[in-house]
Amino acid sequence: MSQSDNTPNSQQSNAQHRKMTNKKQLKVWFLVPLIVFLGLIVMLYMRLGKPTDIVANMALERPVPAFELPLLSDTSRIMTNDNLPDKPFLMNIWGSWCPTCIIEHPFLMELEERGVNLVGVNYKDDIGDALSYLNRGGDPFSMSIQDLSGQFALDLGLTGAPETFIVDGDGIIRQHIIGEVNEANWQERIMPCLMVLNEANKNGNSPDPSQVGEACK
């Protein structure tokens, strides 16, 4: 290194250069949160006015997906679509690990007492835990199938347990309830839909699309 590199002027120049470099780096780091914030604003703006139930609607007006899954109470027996009721029913996705399922369960027991046909889909659950859950709280289901991988529930259109699908006598999904079933959504949504589906099934007809569209919305 030459002697000129160690002069006071050279040292001062190097110090100023480092100071300016540090300032530029600080400015860049301060800009990162601003860029992220602006990106979020743009994303929120683009979502304005768009429906939020797109995933749920994808489940409607199509048959229950084909399945071959074990019966929860006897895993040596394999259930298929042929084992589903030929009358309108509720298909409820549940798990013993699911806190909201525990909250929902007493009301499902009430529906079973009222004569509502419920089919259970035990979602990603340990069989011992699932059976203990039903032994403790009662079993509201005419049958429960074991969906250990969770693929069938995803094929149905599940976004997160618990969820309930109302299926007509032809095996077509007519309504999708996200979250727990309770007295409020039973009165407002589920019961009106079931009444239309049951009436059509009793008369041996397919449900009228306009009636289904109004009652099962």
Image: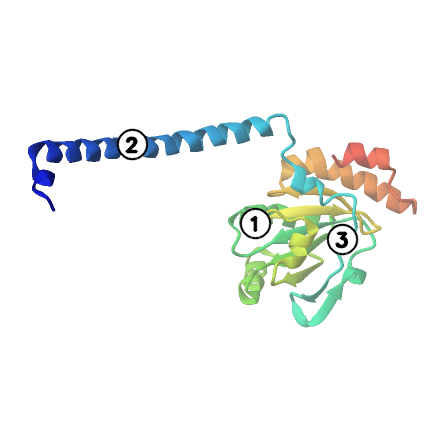
Task: Give coordinates of residue 50: x percent, y percent.
Answer: 64, 29
Secondary structure under badge 3? loop
Alpha carbon separation for disc pair 1 and 2: 54 Å
Q: Amino acid at mark 3?
A: Val
Residue drawn 53% across the image and 28% down it: 42
Report the residue marked by disc 1: 101
Task: Give coordinates of residue 7: x percent, y percent.
Answer: 7, 36
Q: Residues within 10 Å of mark 1 (few under 14, many from 20)?
A: many
Report the residue marked by disc 3: 64
Residue drawn 38% across the image and 34% down it: 32
Q: From what the image shows, is residue 179 above or below residue 47?
A: below
Q: Amino acid at mark 2?
A: Lys
Q: Which one is in front in this view, the residue at disc 1 or the one at disc 3?
A: 3
The residue lying toward the viewer, choosing from 105 and 12, is 12
Q: From what the image shows, is residue 91 above or below residue 14?
A: below
Task: Give coordinates of residue 26: x percent, y percent.
Answer: 28, 33
Residue drawn 31% across the image and 30% down it: 27
> Mark 1 and 2 residues: CB-CB less than 8 Å, in contact?
no
Report the residue marked by disc 2: 24
Q: Is residue 213 found left or right of 25 in the rendered image?
A: right
> Mark 2 and 3 residues: CB-CB less than 8 Å, in contact?
no
